[in-house]
Amino acid sequence: MALLVVGIGIALVLPRVLYSALALRIVLWALFAVSVDLLLGYGGMLSFGHAAFWGAGGYAAALLAKAYQLPFPLAALGGIAVAMALAAPIGYLAIRRRGIYFAMVTLAFAQMLFYVVNELRDLTGGENGVQGVPKILPGISLGRTSDFYYAALPLVLIGFFVAYRIVHSPFGHVLVSIRDNEARAQALGYPTQRYKLIAFVLSGGIAGLAGSLFAIGNSFASLELLHWTTSGSAVLMTVLGGMGTLWGGGVGAAIVLLLEDSLSSVTEAPGIVTGAILIAIVLGFRRGLAPALQTAAVLAWARLRAMRAAREA
C-alpha cells in the first residue's frame, strides 16, 4: 500500500516534471504493462496478443466518443466492455495451451483482429484510423493535454487499484499457486481453468481501459494500437521493471519511454541505442529494476536508522 501511495504522488507531479504528452503516455503504458504483469507475473501466462485488448478498447472508445459525443469516462467504460468481451473467447481457447503455445495462440488472435479492423474501413477508417476523437467531460474544458491528464488520472488510478486488489485477494493467491504448480492446485480442488480464464478477462479489461484513454487522449485510434509490436513493448516493460511486482510495469514504462524520448533528439537511430541499453539493464538486473530499487531503498533506510541510532548512543 505504501508503494501505491508513492505511485499516486509521482503521478500527480509527473506533468510538472515532464511535458504533459509524455507524462500521459507513461501512465497509460504503465497501466497496460500492469495488465500484462497480472497475467504473466502472477498467472505465469505469456501473452503476445494483449495489443488486441489495448487496441479494441481504443477503437471502441474512439468510435463511441465520436459517434455519440459521449463523455470520455463513459466511452472508456464501453472500451473496457468490448475488451473483456473479446478476451473471454480468446482466453477460453488460449488457456488450454501452455508456454509458447499459449503465447502463439494469443498472437494469432491479435493478428486476426489487426487484419479484420483494417478491412472494416467504413467503420474503422482502415489505415487512416479513427481521427478527430473528441475529449468530452461536461463542465470541464479538456483542450490542453495537461487538463485531460488530470481528468483521466482517477480512472488510471482505479485501474491500478483494481489490479492491486486482485493480486492481494484470495483469488490472487490461488492464481500464484497455479503459476507455481498447477497440478498441486488442481489436487487441492481449485478449478484452475476457471481461475486462469477470469484472470485473462480481468487483464484484458485493464488493458482495454488503458487503450481507451490512450486513443481518446491522442484524439486518434490507429492500427498501431493492434500491432504485435505493441504487445511486445508491453511485455518488455513488464520484464524490465520486474515481473510479479505490479509497480514494476510503471518503472519499465517510464524507463523505456524516457529513453526513447531523450535519445530521439540526439541520435538518428534511437531504437538501436535504446535496445542496447535495455539489454544491458535486463542482463544486469535479472529480477527487474523494481526489486533492485526496492532492495536498495530498504538497505538505505536500514543504514540511515543505524547511523541515527549510533549518533543517539
Image (spheres, helix red, strand yellow):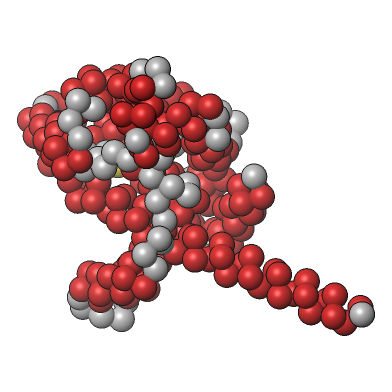
Of 137 and 284, nearer the camera is: 284
Task: Please give the name of the residue rendered at 53% of the width and 27% of the height, measured from the top-left corner.
Answer: 170
Q: Quadrant of residue 84?
A: top left
Task: Please give the name of the residue rendered at 43% of the width and 47% of the height, measured from the top-left corner.
Answer: 244
Q: Is residue 214 above or below residue 201?
A: below
Q: How many marks?
A: 0
In the picture, which quadrant includes the N terminus? top right
Q: Is residue 245 above or below residue 59?
A: below
- Horizontal placement of 250 versus 43: left or right? right
Q: Is residue 101 above or below residue 233?
A: above
- How far across and how far down the image is residue 111, in percent? 12, 37
Of 21 and 104, nearer the camera is: 104
Regarding residue 93, the answer to whether it shows in the image is yes
- How far across and how far down the image is residue 4, in percent? 61, 47
Task: Please give the name of the residue rendered at 32% of the width and 40% of the height, measured from the top-left corner.
Answer: 44
- Horizontal placement of 311 versus 101: left or right? right
Q: Quadrant of residue 54?
A: top left
- How far across and how far down the image is residue 185, in percent? 38, 27
Q: Quadrant of residue 72?
A: top left
- How far across and how far down the image is residue 47, in percent? 25, 40
In the picture, which quadrant includes the C terminus? bottom right
Q: Is residue 223 above or below residue 204?
A: below
- Horizontal placement of 182 versus 168: left or right? left
Of 289 and 43, nearer the camera is: 43
Task: Please give the name of the residue rendered at 54% of the width and 58% of the height, measured from the top-left corner.
Answer: 15
